[in-house]
Amino acid sequence: MNDGVNGVALAVFIFFFLLVTAMGFLAARWRKAENEHSLDEWGLGGRSFGTWVTWFLLGGDLYTAYTFVAVPAAIYAAGAAGFFAVPYTILVYPLIFTFLPRLWSVSHKHGYVTTSDFVRGRFGSKGLSLAVAVTGILATMPYIALQLVGIQAVLDVMGVGGGENTNWFVKDLPLLIAFGVLAAYTYSSGLRAPALIAFVKDTLIYIVIAVAIIYIPIKLGGFDEIFAKASEAYSQTNPATGAPRGALVPSEAGQWTYATLALGSALALFMYPHSITATLSSRSREVIRRNTTILPLYSLMLGLLALLGFMAIAAGVKVSNGQLAIPQLFEDMFPDWFAGVAFAAIGIGALVPAAIMSIAAANLFTRNIYKDFIKPDATPKQETQVSKIVSLLVKVGALVFVLTMDKTVAINFQLLGGIWILQTFPALVGGLFTRWFHRWALIGGWAVGMIYGTVAAYGVASPTQKHFGGSSKEIPGIGEIGYIGLTAFVLNVLVTVVLTFVFRAVKAPEGVDETRPQDYTADAGDAGVQVELPPATAGSSH
Amino acid sequence: MVTPTRVVIALCLVAPFVAMLWVGSYAKTDPQFIGIPFFYWYQMLWVLLSTVLTMTAYKLWQRDQRARSASKGGASR
């Protein structure tokens, strides 16, 4: 790599980049509503999206550039353990099916824009809502930063900006341009921009994967050959650890880790603010349930994508940084122009989620910190303005993060973010089904989960890192190695239950619940459920 | 209220958890499928199975809702 610029690939990449930039700016006019100065409009696309748009948006959230680079990279590095992403996404759908429609209903009934809005309304506690909001923002920031890492990987392999000896400005210029453009159209078009661009992203990604999964194995002599070579590579002893590099199948000891990682990640996914943003932007409750039946298409794609990790080994791709394995495989295997298409897919795959994530983080800040604590009488117009500005700041923050700090810092924080965000599960999902938990107990459980998770993750060493070396550790009391996030979550629930009994015994004030049981099953068209956009304007493209 | 339909819905939604979290049941390389070890193709097969199961749950749930609103005279959903 870095052996000169791949001109053809770069030209194709730039073509697609310009295309989505134009779409991003034009998106503001797509299905435009009368009142554009409301947070519902900018931050939730007017809550008007149908099944297909929601599907693309959720896909944009779930399968980010980082996923595309990191999942095969994990397989490339260690084999079977990296494949947990597939069972993880399988488990996500039954979960969505169960609780998201309730969240949709209650949010539409009461005009909630974020999960913290719901928590505040349900438990009458600004403190708990603040805890959820801060956790959400903290967990989202490194995630955005990792999207940049994904773009960087692609740029590196194309030979632009990758050289270590060029000065930093030239080196980072392409990334700065990409993010400047992203920031500009997110600012002007809000959630409509990523929703529209997601079409391009997913189409490109499907094409690339379909081609890769057929074309590359043929070139490499079939799956037999690929797995035989991979198996051989995994059995080589890693000089740093003295253990084999990996395995094709998880060992007895690795199975707990595999299962807990899958379950913990599945539970965490829909706690992320950006997943909720995509969900709440859908037009009706039905849209969400219908979506759970088509979303698994993405899992299939992810599974096939993961197999690319084995192909990278079989193709003899040698990279010191595992993140570069897949872009390098594309560069080696595909003709230049198609490598350009593949790189564009990854690049645009970074822009879409980064936009949704920054919007989600901005909504959280505006609704649950700015409006609750700084300026309670903010008008909808002011709210939107603050959100727009915060979405910019969040992106600048992520950019600074990536440019000034080592990449491993972003990855460590992303790992911590997953552990943290899972700790908001009891308040959110618990709250959707029962009011039994005491609000202060939920804060207590959250705090314990956060502290345990952080300390435990800090203590994990790996051959290359003293701290944050991984996300799994021995589960106290069971003795197996499991995902820290899930252990912290169980601890969180236990503390919450015990404290709830305590607070109930001492009759601590419970707070006012502004929701009613029937709010959780309300659908579009029922009395009191706001429909921002008249269906007439929404009947365009789906 | 527990009805047979709802039990089936619950089973459809719980099945993927049992299948996927029981890693020991599929942590092996044979039988292979076009050269892909069992561990990998089995999990990808479950993507399809879970899709079918969620779709079944969705259809049953819709029917259940319709039946319920019909019996209540369409008063609420």
Image: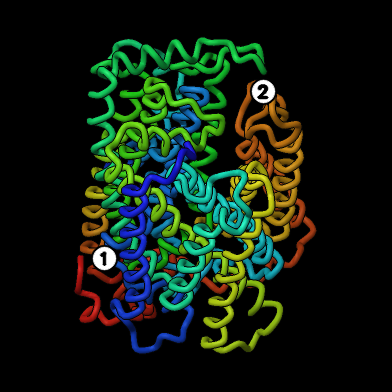
The residue lying at 50 percent from left, 56 percent from top is A433
| Up-down relation of residue A434 to residue A536 (above or below) | above
Q: Which residue is mark 1?
A: B72
The residue lying at 71 percent from left, 54 percent from top is A441
Residue A132 lies, in percent from the top left, at 63, 60
Helix, strand or loop at label 2? It is loop
Dividing the picture into quadrants, the one containing residue A130 is: bottom right
Query: What amino acid type should be assigned to the residue bearing mark 1?
Result: Lys
Can you tell which of label 1 and label 2 is closer to the viewer? 2
Q: Residues within 10 Å of mark 2 (few under 14, many from 20)?
A: few
Q: Which residue is mark 2?
A: A478
Q: Of A350 and A267, which appears nearest the observer?
A: A350
Label 2 marks a residue whose chain is A
Residue A136 lies, in percent from the top left, at 60, 58
Q: Of A466 and A160, which appears nearest the observer?
A: A160
Query: What amino acid type should be assigned to the residue bearing mark 2?
Result: Ile
The residue lying at 23 percent from left, 31 percent from top is A215
The residue lying at 56 percent from left, 89 percent from top is A379
Label 1 marks a residue whose chain is B
| Up-down relation of residue A389 to residue A439 (above or below) | below
Where, quadrant-wise, is the C terminus of chain A in this rendering? bottom left
Q: Is residue A367 left or right of residue A49?
A: right
Residue A377 lies, in percent from the top left, at 63, 89
